[in-house]
Image: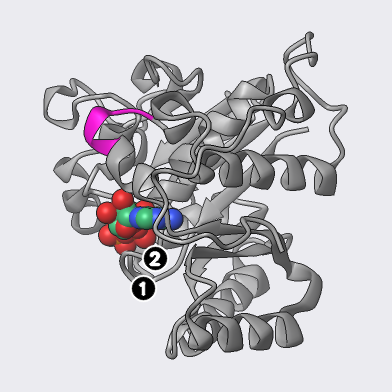
Amino acid sequence: MTHIFAIANQKGGVGKTTTTVNLAASLARMNKKVLLVDLDPQGNATMGSGIEKNDLETSVYDVLVKKTSVGEVLQTAPEAGFDLLPSNSDLTAAEVELLGVEGRDHRLRDGLKNSQGSYDFILIDCPPSLNMLTVNALVAADGVLVPMQCEYYALEGLSALSQTVEAVSASLNPGLQIEGILRTMYDPRNKLSQEVSDQLIEFFSETVYRTIIPRNVRLAEAPSFGLPVIVYDKSSRGALAYIALAGEILRRHGRNDSHKSDDSNSETNINQSAPKDTADENSGNSAA
Ligand SMILES: Nc1ncnc2c1ncn2[C@@H]1O[C@H](COP(=O)(O)OP(=O)(O)OP(=O)(O)O)[C@@H](O)[C@H]1O
Ligand SMILES: [Mg+2]
């Protein structure tokens, strides 16, 4: 079975792209077949996966606007072991070009239909707004993974996103639900972070992932090398946190439905690597 997650939050800079790239790499390391869809014209997930966004001959724009097949646009992230539908600023034009086109909200879903059976997970990195691109992601997805920083206005932003998810599930995609809320860039020494985190658990209980992503400089450095953190520094706390998140997601969804045959290099093995704390700004736990 293929799980399709939109990684969405209309607030900018909360860790959507970092989560998409590093979760994709962690699931791939656990022998899952993963497709990352970069649905943001900023192309950050493309660059962070080691593919130069300015050299693309085709991109996700072609899938949405020209109905080019996914197979023609696909690339493989060089060091990370997942497939990628890359993006660049061409995608900015998609919204205007699709204006008035019938079925423009499900162009991505239509595009993925023929190839999605080859993947265990499809992760869609959304832009920081609730625009037509994000709606395409929500229509194609079966779950929404919401990265959020535990800050004062975070809960307010979450209600706008929840309303959009409800609106899409009421009309265009009845199966859609919030898959999980992920606390990112977490600093346990910050009292406000703790309070917001407590409120999140109170309101959303089980929907909040137990795994917490700490603030970790390795996570911020890795994209400039075009590498996921598990390749850049596999024993950093950022890498271990995203591996833990992948493990938690596999446990939530059962781990037996793999497209790859050998499951021996599993989360348990990877988690045995010793944490190296030198690169961290704080010393909090990466898992609640
Ligand atoms: N856990 C973390 N620790 C330290 N830095 C982080 C962490 N997560 C993300 N960052 C850094 O914070 C910045 C924003 O992260 P990211 O690009 O993932 O957010 P985003 O939600 O995708 O942003 P946008 O809304 O612009 O698409 C980046 O510079 C990233 O490297
Ligand atoms: Mg981003």
> As rendered, which of 230 and 256 lies closer to the eye?
230
Q: Amino acid at mark 1?
A: Lys
Give the image location of residue 35, x and y in percent: 52, 29
Residue, x 47% and y 34% (percent of image)? 36
Q: Amino acid at mark 2?
A: Val
Q: Is residue 224 magenta?
A: yes
- Colour approach in the figure: one colour
Q: Mark 1 — residue?
A: 11
Residue, x 36% and y 33% (percent of image)? 63
Q: Mark 2 — residue?
A: 14
> As rendered, which of 98 and 222 lies closer to the eye?
222
- Disc 2 Cβ-to-ligand 1 distance below 8 Å: yes
Tell which quarter ligand 1 is in. Answer: bottom left
Q: Is residue 61 visible?
A: no
Q: From this viewpoint, which residue is outermost toward the top? A: 261
The magenta stretch is 223-227
Residue, x 51% and y 58% (percent of image)? 214
Q: Secondary structure at mark 2?
A: loop
Which quadrant of the structure image shows residue 258? top right
Query: Residues at badges 2 and 1 in contact (C-beta under 8 Å)?
Result: yes
Answer above or below: position of 177 versus 143: below
Q: Around disc 2, counting alpha carbons within 10 Å, would you say few (fewer than 14), some (14 to 19), or many (20 or more)?
A: many
**Image quarter hosting the C terminus:** bottom right
